[in-house]
Structure formats: C-alpha cells, structure tokens
C-alpha cells in the first residue's frame, strides 16, 4: 500500500516550510523513525522522521520548494513489496471536481483510501495560502514510472502574474536553476539543448559568457536587468523566507509595539575575569568553554529574582501584566540562516556548572541549525552578546513577548580610577532595553545597576543569589 507523509506543523501554528535537504531517494528502503528530510520553518531547521517501514516511491517536493502544512511531501510503499513493484510506481491522473474541470487541478490524495499521489507540479494543491497556480506540462503523460536510479525532477511551466495569460516556464533541473540565479541569468530567455528542450548547465554558462543583458534571476517581476558580465558589481537578491522572514517580522512587530527605552552602564569587570579564570580550573567545568557570558547570565538571573517585573510580558487582550516567576533565558545567536533566540528552560533553577553546560549546548545546536521549535519558544528575558563581534554597546530590540533584553559589550583594557589612582582595568558596557509600558526608569536603572554591581564584585552573586 502506498502511504503519503504530509508536512506536519512542527511549531506553534506554522503554515509552511521549505524543503532543505532530502536524506532518501526513490527506491531506497526506509525504517520507522529514520530521518528522511530536513525542513526550514519560520523558527528553525527541523529533521523529520519517517513514520513507517517501507520503500520510497516518490519525492513529492523538491529541495528549496516551499510547502504548505498538510501537503504530502513523500510517498512510501509500506508492507513487503516485491522488486517489480519497487521498480515502477504508477502516478494517477490529477483529481478533478466539476467546478475545477476547466482548470488544472491537483487533489491531495486520501491517505485512508490508499490513493496514489500526483507528481510534483501537476495540478493545484490544497492550501490555505494563495500561490500561483501551476500548469500541467503540455504533452506530458499523466502517469510515469519512478526509475530505480534517482532523478532530479524537472519543474513544469507556471502561470505568470497576469491572470489568464499562460506563459511557458523553461524546463530545468534545480541545480541548473540555482546556477542561473547565481549568474543572473533568466531561464526564460534561453533555448534549451537538453532532452525535451530542457536547459542544461552548458546552456546557462554559454549565456553568461556572452554577456547578453537578461532579466535578473530572483528579481521576481523581471523588471530589473543585470548583465552577467557585470553581475559581481550589480545587485544581489536574497529571498526572505524561513528563519530570516520570521526574524524580520518579529523585530518589526516588537519595535513598533513596545515603547523601547535603553540605558547604558560601563562596568569594571576585572574581578569577574579573575573569577572566570579560577572557574575554568575547577573539575565541575572540565570540557566546557566557559566565557564571561556565564557570569553575565547568572547576574541577570539574580537581578530578575530581585526585580520580578523585569521578567514579565504585556497581555494587551486581557489588559494585564503577566509576571513570570521562572526564567527561560534567551540567548541571541547569529546562526547561518539568520538571528534566532533559543532559550534555556528554567535557567534560574540551574547550578553554575549546569548553566554553563546549557549555554554551550544551546549555542552549538543553534549555530549548527539544529535548534528545535521548543528551544525557540517560551523565552522570558534575553541576553545578546555583541562583545563577541568586537562591539562595545548597542540598543537591542526586545524579543517579542518579553520585557527586557541585556546587551553585553566586549571586555577590553580601559583607563579606570581606582582608589583615586589611574589604573588599567578590564571593562565593558552593558545596555538594557526594556518595555516602558511595564518598566519605568527607576526599575530599569535598578536592574542594570544590580547586574553591574555583581559583575564588579562576583561575591555579590553569592550574597544576593
């Protein structure tokens, strides 16, 4: 029996995700729980396991394609099919309803009925979001065999933005499309020399070598032009989707919803740096890369316990301030796919070695693109370590739903007056942004002052914590 695995909602109400990489191909055996694909949602890159034992019949979505939640992405033949069945899997004709008979239609197959899925690009998928409809390729048969050797599917033509005016989309495999985007080549301008008129890598490279001015790939509407010969000095367009899209929307929402106030404090952290060196020698911290961030995090946790209102959120619908008597500590991480803020759950209940392990694990998994949706939700207050980039200070934007964010600048040698004498000390600048609807200047100053005091004299962490 052929079963279809539909893209699940792996986060909190997410509606779509991008296919990042397939780990299987048609004809391969798969097991229940085996990782078959990586997807990128608005919050993280997530690995999805196969829910059955069986054989991959078809991949229903390509790498780089955006797929709506609930749409099938892979067909798996479950049970014990023989070799002949594995070698060839027929694809059914697209389903039509009377109202849709005049337009290309794609019906999401009924899993319970065991219906086969349609091939990628044939018909219209069921979706709650509005997307450009796909046209069936003229002359392409409605059934096809899946070869035993993997093939990269060729995308069909699409309808243009103007309704009712079909336009053929050049046939090309995904690697060729990527090459064209990188070189600024519009595939619509090229004549393909491959099978069925498909465009090959050689076709794209020849077009780039000619220096002919064509529409910039990735420009969307095709209104901008760029010469491939001068592409290095021209415009580059980066699709805004996945984590970057979510981050951009969240920052805009936060900046124009919560009235931000930022205060600064320069702190002598010489004693903290000395304590850090001693901590690194303790057996409890063996194998851990302990940084000043550990002490900053501990100081913020203690300050939040002393001033609970700093660790709260604004509930506009209920017209209430929600004070969190626990701390899920967010750490801003510059990951490859964009800024993310994973958090350590119940960080206030951790010992110093446990907090160090939590910080290291969270940073490593996030930079590797392995942070889960659970890691990225539920934060209550955030630290952003701008010092690692050689920056002294900044005015950080609040993580949506939180009341405060602390920026920690670089530690450097600084002239400092100690007991009336000029000395060279280790110093850094702290920046605290807070939501002025909840936190007034007095409370914000008290929190920042307490954090600074603990970093100037780490013994205060023992006294206050």
Image (cartoon, helix red, strand yellow):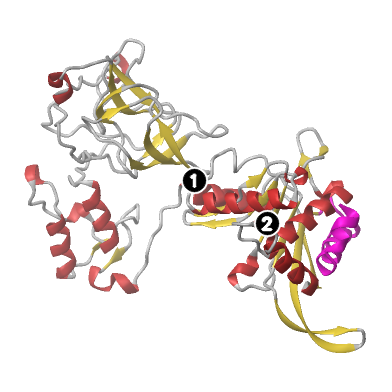
**The quarter of the displayed image where residue 450 is located:** bottom right
Q: Position of residue 341 (x, y in %)?
A: 61, 50
Q: Bin the neighbour count of mark 2 within 10 Å (Cα to Cα): few under 14, some 14-19, many 20 and up.
A: few
Against 432, residue 61 (above or below) is: above
Front residue of this view, candidates 341 and 236:
341
- Predominant SS along the magenta part: helix
Which residue is label 1 attached to?
A: 370
In three-dimensional space, the C-alpha distance between marks 1 and 2, rounded to whole angstroms, equals: 29 Å
Q: Is residue 189 left or right of residue 115?
A: left
**The quarter of the displayed image where residue 12 is located:** top right
Q: Is residue 81 left or right of residue 336?
A: left
The reply to whether residue 444 is visible in this rendering is: no
Q: Position of residue 88 (x, y in %)?
A: 14, 23
Identify the magenta region: 436-465
Residue at coordinates 19% horizontally, 47% vertically from top-left?
A: 172
Q: Position of residue 464 (x, y in %)?
A: 89, 54
Front residue of this view, candidates 431 and 46:
46
Q: Secondary structure at mark 2?
A: helix
Against 137, residue 290 (above or below) is: below
Instruction: Say the numbered circle drawn on residue 362.
Output: none
Instruction: Say the numbered circle drawn on residue 283.
Output: 2
Residue 457 in magenta? yes
Q: Quick one: quadrant of the N terminus?
A: top left
Q: Secondary structure at mark 1?
A: loop
Q: Is residue 121 left or right of residue 305?
A: left
Q: Are marks 1 and 2 in contact (CB under 8 Å)?
A: no
Front residue of this view, candidates 380 and 275:
275
Q: Nearer the viewer, mark 1 or mark 2?
A: 2
Furthest toward the front, the residue is 283
Against 78, residue 311 (above or below) is: below
Q: Position of residue 5 (x, y in %)?
A: 37, 25
Count how many numbered circles sit on residues in the image.
Answer: 2
């Amino acid at each position: 029996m052929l079963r279809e695995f539909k893209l699940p909602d792996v986060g909190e109400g997410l509606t779509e995700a991008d296919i990042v990489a397939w780990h299987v191909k048609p004809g391969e055996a798969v097991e229940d729980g085996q990782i078959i694909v990586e997807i990128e949602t608005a919050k993280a890159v997530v690995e999805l396991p196969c829910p059955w034992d069986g054989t991959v019949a078809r991949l229903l979505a390509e790498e780089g394609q955006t797929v709506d939640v609930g749409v099938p992405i892979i067909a798996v033949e479950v049970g014990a099919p023989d070799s002949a069945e594995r070698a060839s899997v027929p694809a059914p004709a697209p389903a039509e309803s009377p109202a849709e008979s005049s337009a290309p239609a794609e019906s999401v197959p009924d899993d319970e009925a065991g219906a086969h899925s349609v091939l990628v690009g044939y018909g219209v998928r069921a979706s709650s979001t509005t997307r450009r409809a796909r046209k069936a390729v003229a002359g392409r048969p409605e059934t096809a065999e899946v070869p035993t050797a993997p093939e990269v599917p060729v995308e069909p033509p699409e309808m243009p933005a103007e309704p009712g005016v079909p336009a053929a989309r050049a046939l090309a495999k995904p690697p060729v499309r990527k090459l064209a985007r990188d070189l600024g080549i519009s595939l619509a301008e090229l004549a393909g020399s491959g099978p069925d008129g498909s465009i090959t890598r050689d076709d794209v490279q020849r077009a780039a070598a000619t220096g002919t001015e064509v529409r910039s790939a990735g420009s969307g509407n095709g209104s901008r032009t760029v010469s491939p010969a001068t592409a290095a000095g021209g415009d580059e367009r980066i699709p805004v989707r996945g984590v970057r899209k979510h981050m951009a929307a969240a920052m805009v929402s936060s900046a124009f919803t919560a009235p931000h106030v930022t205060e600064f404090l320069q702190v002598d952290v010489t004693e903290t740096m000395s304590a850090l060196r001693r901590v690194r020698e303790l057996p409890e911290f063996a194998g851990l890369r302990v940084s000043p961030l550990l002490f900053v995090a501990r100081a913020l946790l203690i300050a939040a316990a002393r001033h609970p209102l700093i660790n709260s959120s604004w509930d506009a619908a209920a017209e209430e301030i929600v004070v969190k008597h626990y701390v899920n500590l967010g750490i801003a991480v510059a990951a490859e796919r964009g800024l993310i803020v994973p958090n350590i759950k119940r960080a206030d209940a951790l010992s110093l070695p446990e907090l160090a392990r939590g910080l290291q694990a969270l940073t490593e998994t996030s930079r590797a693109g392995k942070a889960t949706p659970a890691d990225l939700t539920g934060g209550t207050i955030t630290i952003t370590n701008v010092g690692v980039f050689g920056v002294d200070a900044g005015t950080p934007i609040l993580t949506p739903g939180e009341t405060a964010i602390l920026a920690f600048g670089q530690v450097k040698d600084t002239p400092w007056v100690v007991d009336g004498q000029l000395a060279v000390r280790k110093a850094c600048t702290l920046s605290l942004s807070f939501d002025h609807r909840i936190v007034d200047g007095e409370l914000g100053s008290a929190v920042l002052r307490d954090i600074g005091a603990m970093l100037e004299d780490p013994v205060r962490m023992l006294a206050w914590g």
